[in-house]
Amino acid sequence: MYYEMQYRVTYADTDQMGVVYYANYLEYFERARTEMFRSIGLPYSEMEAKGVIMPVSEAHCKYLSSARYDDLLTFRCWISEYSRVRVKIATEVRRDDEVLASGYVVLACVGRDFRVARLPQWMVEFCDKCLLEEEK
């Protein structure tokens, strides 16, 4: 399942050259995955209340083209894979049909003690909802 949201680029997102600053794409990835989890009924605040913390353990972004001030972007994300302790979330940043950037983050499942923990069954069920069909 893809999750999509739209976002209009603000001046604060751009650098001196008038393009979106490269590090902002990782923030865009975060916005998309946060809203994806919220859309399926699992906001991060609820995960954390249940004792599950999901820090980023790996991040990758490939830049293909520049976004500029006032562009209307679409963030598309999905769970591309998961294991007993990790969730990999792929994301694309698009302007219309053009992919401007693509990449992924890997989230590690840890408990309140910050030790790696198994994904609880309820989390596995939520991951299954967001796992892209051709990835299953």
Image (cartoon, grey):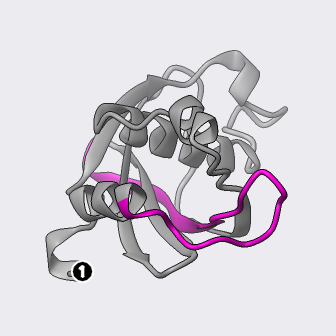
In the figure, 85 relative to 107: above or below? below
Using the image as rendered, state which of residue 101 and residue 67 is in the foreground: 101
What residue sits 62% from the left and 51% below the top?
Answer: 52
Q: Position of residue 82 (x, y in %)?
A: 43, 76
User: In the image, which residues are magenta?
Assistant: 96-121
Q: Position of residue 35 (x, y in %)?
A: 43, 34
- In the picture, measured across the screen, residue 119 lies left or right of residue 74, that is right
- In the picture, measured across the screen, residue 116 lies left or right of residue 102, that is right
Q: Residue furthest left?
A: 133
Magenta segment: does it hold 103?
yes
What residue sits 15% from the left and 72% below the top?
Answer: 133
Using the image as rendered, state which of residue 27 and residue 35 is in the foreground: 35
Q: Amino acid type of disc 1? A: Glu
Q: Residues within 10 Å of mark 1 (few under 14, many from 20)?
A: few
Quadrant of the rendering where the N terminus is positioned: bottom left
Magenta segment: does it hold 108?
yes
Using the image as rendered, state which of residue 53 and residue 6 is in the foreground: 53
Q: Name the residue carrying label 1.
A: 135
Asked if one can make out residue 72 in the rendered structure from this viewpoint, the answer is yes
What residue sits 73% from the left and 50% below the top?
Answer: 22
In the figure, 53 relative to 73: above or below? below
- In the picture, measured across the screen, residue 22 lies left or right of residue 63, that is right
What residue sits 45% from the left and 26% below the top?
Answer: 7
In the figure, 102 relative to 94: above or below? below
Quadrant of the rendering where the C terminus is positioned: bottom left
State which quadrant residue 55 falls in.
Answer: bottom right
